[in-house]
Amino acid sequence: MFCLVGFAAIIGPRLAVAVWWLLGDKVELAFDSWIWPLLGLVFLPWTTLAYLIAWQPGGLDGNWDVLLIVLGMALDILTYMHRFAAKAVRPAPRY
């Protein structure tokens, strides 16, 4: 069960951003170049997804948008912490 949750946390936002990028035009409107959404897709997918949700044609507007992006950043940090914690829990081999 925990593997499924971890897999969804890793793949879910990347899949959502990729589908949004392929089927819509909001990614091109929100970012100036193709490199930023690609880097966000690889390294910070939750933050990129939150930015796409918060972005409007006039840019970011208000504190709720910033709060949503900070929440996305926190989810990225938690996802990376989960990966490192899973590696740290493995017991050392006995010789």
Image (cartoon, rainbow, N blue to C red):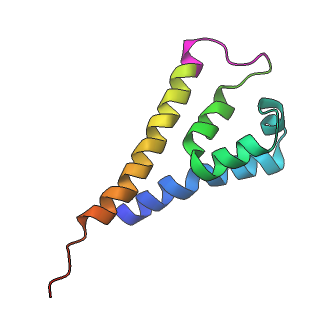
Q: Residue at x 57, y 44 (%)?
A: 44
Picture layout, residue 87 above or below residue 33 = below
Q: Nearer the viewer, residue 91 or 95?
A: 95
Q: How many marks?
A: 0
| Residue reaching furthest to the front | 95
- Quadrant that contains the C terminus: bottom left
Residue positioned 82% across, 38% down in the render: 33
Residue 13 shows in this picture:
yes
Find residue 29 and report its image quarter.
Answer: top right
Within the image, what quadrant is residue 85 found in? bottom left
Please say if 16 is above or below 11.
Answer: above
> In which quadrant of the rendered image does the N terminus lie?
bottom left
The vertical placement of 90 against 47, above or below, is: below
* Residue 92 percent location from the top left of the image: 20, 75
The answer to whether residue 1 is seen in the rendering is no
Q: Look at the image and give the residue range highlighted in magenta.
A: 58-65
Q: Is residue 12 left or right of residue 3?
A: right
| Residue 83 picture quarter | bottom left
Position of residue 15 in the picture relative to residue 30 (left or right): left
Q: Residue at x 63, y 53 (%)?
A: 42
Estimate the x, y position of residue 4 in percent, counting from the top left.
43, 63
Magenta stretch mostly in which secondary structure? loop
* Magenta span includes 59: yes
Q: Nearer the viewer, residue 73 or 18?
A: 73
At which x and y percent is residue 22? 81, 51
Q: Residue furthest bottom?
A: 95
